Image (cartoon, grey):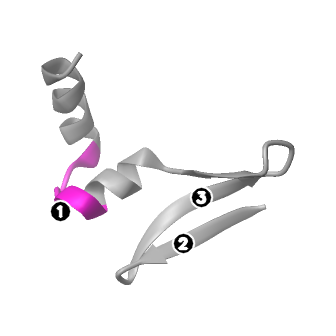
């Protein structure tokens, strides 16, 4: 079951994993909303380089 969740009227891609009974969310969507960045993939790359 694939779904789009809304957080403050912004979309976050999500998927329900039935065997694990868990929701999985697109990290880039969450990072973009929380940091208000225009390029979430670049932000994630810089964060990975900075933090071990």
Q: Which residues are magenta?
A: 33-40
Say few, some or many: other residues with alpha carbon within 10 Å of mark 2 (under 14 / 14 to 19 / 20 or more).
Answer: some
Corner quadrant of residue 7: bottom left
Judging from the image, what secondary structure is the residue with disc 3 in? strand
Pointer 2: what residue? 5
Are circles 2 and 3 on residues that touch, CB within 8 Å?
A: yes
Are circles 3 and 1 on residues that touch, CB within 8 Å?
A: no
Pointer 3: what residue? 14
Pointer 1: what residue? 36
Are circles 2 and 1 on residues that touch, CB within 8 Å?
A: no
Q: Nearer the viewer, residue 21 or 45?
A: 21
Separation of residues labelled 2 and 3 (CA atoms): 7 Å
Q: Which is nearer the N-term, disc 3 or disc 1?
A: 3
Q: Is residue 27 magenta?
A: no
Separation of residues labelled 2 and 1 (CA atoms): 17 Å
Separation of residues labelled 3 and 1 (CA atoms): 19 Å
Residue at 47% across, 77% down: 6
């Amino acid at each position: 079951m694939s779904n789009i969740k809304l957080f403050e009227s912004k979309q976050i891609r999500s998927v329900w994993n039935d065997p694990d009974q868990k929701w999985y969310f697109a990290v880039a969507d969450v990072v973009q909303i929380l940091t208000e960045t225009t390029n979430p993939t670049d932000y994630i790359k810089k964060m990975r380089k900075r933090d071990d």
